[in-house]
Amino acid sequence: MAHGPSTYKPTNAFTRWLDSRLPIIRFLDDTMMQFPTPKNLNYWFTFGGILMIMLVVQIISGIVLAMHYVPHETLAFDSVERIMRDVNYGWLIRYIHSNGASFFFIAVYLHIFRGLYYGSYKAPREVLWLLGIVIYLLMMATGFLGYTLPWGQMSFWGATVITNFFSAIPFVGEAITQWLWGSFAVDNSTLQRFFSLHYLLPFVIAGVVILHIWALHVPGNNNPLGIDVKGPADTVPFHPYYTTKDGFAIAVFLLFFCYFVFFNPNFLGHADNYIPANRLVTPAHIVPEWYYLPLYAVLRSVPDKLFGVILMFGAIFVWALLPWLDTSRVRSNKFRPIMRQLFWILMFVIFILGYLGAQTADDSNLVFFGIELPIGKLLLAQIFTIYYFLHFLVITPLVGLLETPHPVPESISKAVLAKKGAASAASA
């Protein structure tokens, strides 16, 4: 580990006996309790802990739901209704799981955007960033598979539409699609495959999360200043400082989560999924879960199916290139005035793409919060998709070369002391 020799001291005969045979307590103490962490981390750095809690929530609630769910096309919808009505607290477990998926993605998006803003993808954290992208891709697959399991109208037709995109791949597309289906159409074989994979992937995510944490502990945490730790004066032990801070952030996050579970459990879902799947009736508007909407807008921005699929996956893959596309020697946008403004423009572009992904698939004028704009939805999606890729592939490298950053502090401790001194002077 990056922080040097172990400082753990067994306190009794049992811990001394265990430490000489299986030093798991020493490992936990070194990596979770005594691990030196930059002393200037703000609440944007608490989402890693939040994501760990949400992953545990999803795995436990998913295991309980799997005990009662029946992965059969004639029984799946009714088994979900039985969970809601007849299983003790089944409604609660199901709402925790369904809303937990949305809050898992809320936390991961905030975690990713924080990494973008503070330059957490830059050396020496490239592998950490790449593992984070792998986790995000696994989450996307898991979320999609889980969305199909209630076997409502939106589940069935969402599975039909998304799996059909693989058929656009030259030469092997039809074979891949039929392998996903397990048949020649979305049917019972598809549901059973999706259930099996949905049960498996969270444990794969947990394994990659362990690698992600390992990769974090080698170079250590990034920080809002984006500068390297210069010595012990720049750090504090993870416990009790950040266990307390993370605990408070987790509690606040869970309060919002509980509001949706208990008071507005269907707000983030779709009403059509309470209609049993019917292959003879196509919904008026097939739409994925909200956390896929920006990518869905990118996919629909071009009429060619293959090119749309390439663009959709390219919108994620371009993140993997970011450590090498960003040419700036300064990590944090806190000291990059131009890139800081461009970051917020990118956030606006992603928000609009998400809004466009929720609209019907036609080229009528966009109605934005009740106001009709004089521009077609397809054209606007194309414009914002082009800007999205330009931001990463062209703008980011050029700005890194041309921008003049603000002066960066010499060390974390000096920056913290200067901030405290300024605050004391202002209060006086």
Image (cartoon, rainbow, N blue to C red):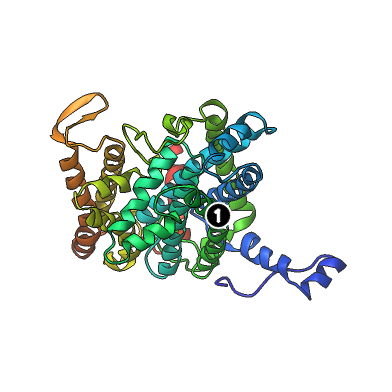
Which residue is drawn at the image coordinates 64% and 63% (left, top)?
34
Q: In the drawing, does residue 207 fall left or right of residue 376?
A: right
Where is residue 300? Give x, y as percent. Answer: 24, 46
Q: Can residue 393 be seen in this view?
A: yes
Q: Where is residue 60 in the image (x, y as percent from the top left)?
A: 64, 47
Quadrant of the drawing holding the N terminus: bottom right
Any part of residue 415 in sight: no
Q: Name the residue under label 1.
A: 196
Q: How many marks on residues?
A: 1
Amino acid type assigned to the residue bearing label 1 in the image? Ser
Point out the residue furthest to the right here: 13
Q: Which residue is drawn at 76% across and 69% down?
A: 9
Q: Most extreme residue toward the left, as rendered?
A: 374
Closest to the observer, 254 or 217: 254
Q: Position of residue 176 (x, y in %)?
A: 38, 61
Q: Tell me what residue is drawn at x 44 percent, y 66 percent.
A: 228
Image quadrant containing the C terminus? top left
Q: Quadrant of residue 412?
A: bottom left
As rendered, which of 84 and 258 lies closer to the eye? 84
Residue 377, above or below 108: above
Left or right, residue 259 beside residue 294: right
Please state if 180 lies on the left or on the right of 235 as rendered: left
Q: How crowded is mark 1: few (under 14 residues within 10 Å), some or many (20 or more)?
A: few
Image coordinates for residue 252, horizontal then vertical, percent: 55, 37
Callout 1 secondary element: helix
Which residue ends up furthest to the top in the rendered image? 370
The front one of 319 and 11 is 319
Q: Which of 305 and 175 is in front in this view?
A: 175
